[in-house]
């Protein structure tokens, strides 16, 4: 009876070790997938940030040209408009 109990504990321990190994394997797979997703999303965010930067620069130039035209009476290139006082 004692030997049977010892054998049962050994079998249980072996199953526990196998389950832990499988768990670690699955965790590794998920970590790898998450890492790939994070890298993909970083790339998307960087592309969106670059697009936003370009849009903001363009908008800033347009606003500067409008301000220059309205306040100074000339285009942002520095040349007076035809009806602007010299």
Image (cartoon, grey):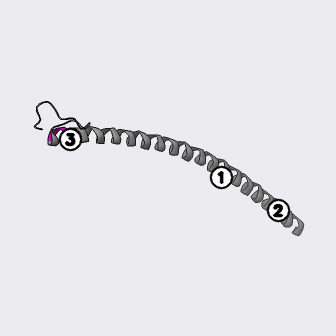
Q: Which mark is residue 27?
A: 1
Packing grade of label 1 (10 A; few <14, some 14-19, many >=20) is few
Q: Quadrant of the N terminus?
A: bottom right
Q: Which mark is residue 86?
A: none
Q: Residue at x 51, y 44 (%)?
A: 41
Horizontal side of residue 2 vs 85, given as left or right = right
In this figure, which residue is indicated by the disc labeled 2? 8
Numbered disc in front, either 2 or 3 = 3
Question: Hey, which residue is sitting farthest bottom in the picture?
Answer: 2
80 or 2: nearer the eye?
A: 80
Choose the circle earlier in sequence order: 1 or 2. Answer: 2
Q: Is 67 part of what is drawn in magenta? A: yes
| Image: magenta residue range | 66-70
Q: Are marks 2 and 3 in contact (CB under 8 Å)?
A: no
Q: Residue at x 10, y 32 (%)?
A: 83
Query: Dot 3 lies on which element?
Result: helix
Principal secondary structure, stretch drawn in magenta = helix
How far is mark 3 from mark 1, CA to CA?
60 Å
Horizontal side of residue 43 vs 84, given as left or right = right
Packing grade of label 2 (10 A; few <14, some 14-19, many >=20) is few
Query: Dot 1 lies on which element?
Result: helix
Q: Residue at x 77, y 59 (%)?
A: 17
User: Residue 37: percent from the left, percent from the top?
Assistant: 56, 44
Choose the circle earlier in sequence order: 3 or 1. Answer: 1
User: Residue 29: percent from the left, percent from the top?
Assistant: 66, 47
In this figure, which residue is indicated by the disc labeled 3? 68
Numbered disc in front, either 3 or 1 = 3
Numbered disc in front, either 1 or 2 = 1
User: Residue 50: percent from the left, percent from the top?
Assistant: 43, 41
Query: Dot 2 lies on which element?
Result: helix
Q: Is 60 part of what is drawn in magenta? A: no
């Amino acid at each position: 009876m004692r030997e049977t109990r010892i054998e049962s504990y050994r079998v249980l321990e072996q199953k526990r070790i196998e389950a832990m190994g499988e768990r670690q394997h699955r965790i590794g797979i998920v970590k790898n997938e998450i890492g790939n997703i994070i890298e993909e999303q970083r790339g998307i965010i960087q592309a969106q940030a670059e697009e936003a930067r370009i849009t903001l620069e363009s908008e800033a130039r347009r606003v500067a040209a409008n301000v220059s035209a309205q306040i100074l009476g000339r285009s942002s290139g520095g040349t007076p408009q035809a009806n602007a006082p010299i």
